[in-house]
Image: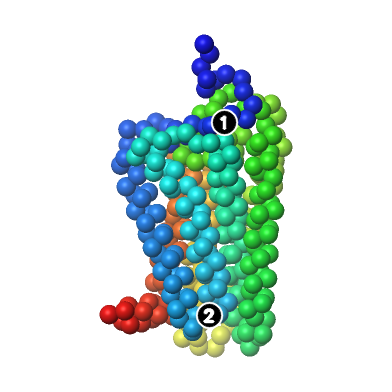
């Protein structure tokens, strides 16, 4: 009888996730930093949401966007970690075909959403520093809500073709995915038979359309912001203005650098070991959700003060 994992089939009922190929014996040890990062991400982002909700002085555009970022981070890391840990701890490698496509959609959708939120936050900083007198008039609660809806719609619509392109492909190679989660090109490129150029080109289009354009918009915003900052008359004013942007810049770098590295390694790193690809893909999805609440909690005085006040009131 032919091996069920290599028999010709179309849209298999399940896929098998291998975890991190080549490092199976170290899965339990690798799970420790992964679980630690996930725990910090969950506690940190829920803390940000709680503080902003409790403190009326934080009910403004910057903190609303920060709450959107926290929710996005929670969904993003939760979309991969529970299944990854079940592979590491219980060797539970099977994933239903529909569940795999759902995970694929959530990963890419919320990655695109996070990029869009960073653009919105850069616009908020641009208005706050370059047009401070118009900030409250331009970024009303209604405008912030519309920006949030636009970010969600953009990500949902751009990523929607991914699961459909994956579902329409005949799978005749194998149902084994050498990864910890269902990532679009890992599913289509490695498993599907036939011409996969449409999926590959569309994936590249999304990367260029989202990360490329978003990074351009963020760069333009911060070019204007830095020009405005360095034209301020006093050193204290310049340092104060830079301080309001430093946390955002750190968060942007923690998101785009691993994402860019992962994308380049996946598309051009043909000699890079497979386990390194998988580790980088996990770092890209775990590190920003863990770091963002730490960055904003440490670098933003209003959040630090509000957190101290909440702790004091709870005693």
Looking at the picture, does residue 54 appear above or below residue 269?
below
Looking at the picture, tell me which residue is in the foreground, 27 or 246. Answer: 27
Residue 118 occupies quadrant: bottom right
Total marks shown come to 2
Q: Quadrant of residue 113?
A: bottom right
Does residue 93 appear left or right of residue 134 in this picture? left
* Mark 1 vs mark 2, CA separation in Å: 47 Å
Residue 169: image location, x then y, percent: 67, 32
Which one is earlier in the sequence, the residue at label 1 or at label 2?
A: 1
For residue 169, say whether it is visible: yes
| x 49%, y 64%: residue | 70
Q: Residues within 10 Å of mark 1 (few under 14, many from 20)?
A: few
Q: Position of residue 67 (x, y in %)?
A: 52, 69
Where does residue 116 sit, x and y in percent of width and height?
A: 62, 62
Specify the label residue 59 is tagged with.
Answer: 2
Which numbered disc, 1 or 2, marks the residue closer to the eye? 1
At a point 40% along the width and 80% down the height, the residue shown is: 306
Asked whether residue 223 is in view, the answer is no
- Kindly check if marks 1 and 2 are in contact, taking CB atoms under 8 A apart as contact: no
- Circle 2 crowding by C-alpha within 10 Å: few under 14, some 14–19, many from 20: few
Q: Which residue is mark 1?
A: 13
Colour scheme shown: rainbow
Q: Nearer the viewer, residue 95 or 127?
A: 95
Badge number at residue 107: none
Residue furthest to the left: 315
Which residue occupies 58% across, 45% down? 102
């Amino acid at each position: 009888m032919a091996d069920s994992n290599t028999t010709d089939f179309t849209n298999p009922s399940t896929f098998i996730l291998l975890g991190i190929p080549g490092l199976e014996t170290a899965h339990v040890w690798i799970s420790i930093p992964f679980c630690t990062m996930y725990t910090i991400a969950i506690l940190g982002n829920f803390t940000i949401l709680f503080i902003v909700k409790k403190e009326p002085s934080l009910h403004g555009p910057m903190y609303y966007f920060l709450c959107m970022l926290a929710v996005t981070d929670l969904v993003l890391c939760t979309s991969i970690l529970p299944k990854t840990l079940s592979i590491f701890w219980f060797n539970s490698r099977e994933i239903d075909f529909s569940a795999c496509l759902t995970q694929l959609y959530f990963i890419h959708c919320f990655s695109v959403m996070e990029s869009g939120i960073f653009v919105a936050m850069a616009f908020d900083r641009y208005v706050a520093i370059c047009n401070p007198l118009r900030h409250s008039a331009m970024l009303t609660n209604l405008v912030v809500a519309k920006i949030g809806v636009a970010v969600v719609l953009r990500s949902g619509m751009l990523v929607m073709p991914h699961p459909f392109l994956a579902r329409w492909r005949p799978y005749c190679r194998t149902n084994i995915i050498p990864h910890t989660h269902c990532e679009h090109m890992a599913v289509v490129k490695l498993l599907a038979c036939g011409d996969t150029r449409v999926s590959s080109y569309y994936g590249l289009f999304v990367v260029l359309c989202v990360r490329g354009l978003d990074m351009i918009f963020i760069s333009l915003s911060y070019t204007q912001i830095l020009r405005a900052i360095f034209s301020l008359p006093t050193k204290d004013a310049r340092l104060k203005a830079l301080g309001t942007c430093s946390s955002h810049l750190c968060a942007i770098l923690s998101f785009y650098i691993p994402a860019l590295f992962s994308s380049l390694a996946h598309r051009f790193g043909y000699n890079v070991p497979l386990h390194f690809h998988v580790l980088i893909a996990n770092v890209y999805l775990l590190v920003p959700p863990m770091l963002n609440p730490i960055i904003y909690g440490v670098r933003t005085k209003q959040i630090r003060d509000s957190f101290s006040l909440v702790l004091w009131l709870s005693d």
